[in-house]
Image: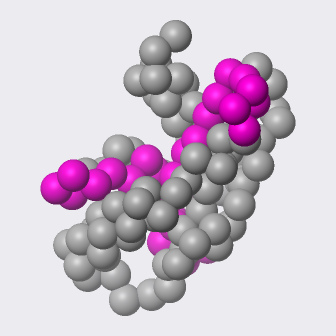
Amino acid sequence: MNNKKIGDLGEDLAIKILQSKDYEILERNYRYKRSEIDIIALHHNLLVFIEVKSLHSFQHGFPEERVNQAKVDKVMEAAEDYIHAINWQKDIRFDILSINLKKPSEYLHIEDAFY
């Protein structure tokens, strides 16, 4: 399975997980220049930017460990554009949702993963 299919499958599962936790999905794959945010959602009047990482195997580490500083910078750049575009005036949060594709019920939702 190629990286695009793995990513799409992970994001599909992430949306189901988030919706089961009462998140309202606003955007998927929001792009700004060369930056992308996997999922943007509302949760209890909080705008949440979610980076989804999923793997079939933990042979080379856990999915959440693949979020490096360059990725954080890109997500924050796109988030700034989105916040400005919708004129958001309330609180925000950046999360990571790490999913084991072999056992999707075994996921890790890291709230306030970076800022």
**Quadrant position of residue 62:** top right
Residue 96 among magenta residues: no
Q: Position of residue 99 (x, y in %)?
A: 69, 37
Please tell me which residue is depicted at 76% across the width and 20% down the height of the picture: 102
Q: Which residues are magenta?
A: 32-61
Please tell me which residue is depicted at 65% across the width and 50% down the height of the picture: 65
Residue 56 among magenta residues: yes
Above or below, 12 against 67 in this view is: above
User: Which is nearer the eye, 55 or 111?
Assistant: 55
Camera sees residue 41? no
Camera sees residue 106? yes
Q: Position of residue 69 (x, y in %)?
A: 48, 64
- 23 vs 105, left or right, is left
Q: How is the image coloured?
A: one colour
- 34 vs 6, left or right, is left
Please tell me which residue is depicted at 45% across the width and 87% down the height of the picture: 90
Above or below, 14 against 64 in this view is: above
Q: Position of residue 112 (x, y in %)?
A: 64, 73
- 97 vs 107, left or right, is left
Which residue appears farthest toward the bottom when viewing the image? 89
Prevailing SS of the magenta stretch: strand
Above or below, 24 against 85 in this view is: above
User: Which is nearer the eye, 66 or 10?
Assistant: 66
Which residue appears farthest toward the top when viewing the image? 1
Q: Position of residue 55 (x, y in %)?
A: 64, 29
- 5 vs 101, left or right, is left
Please tell me which residue is depicted at 39% across the width and 53% down the height of the picture: 37
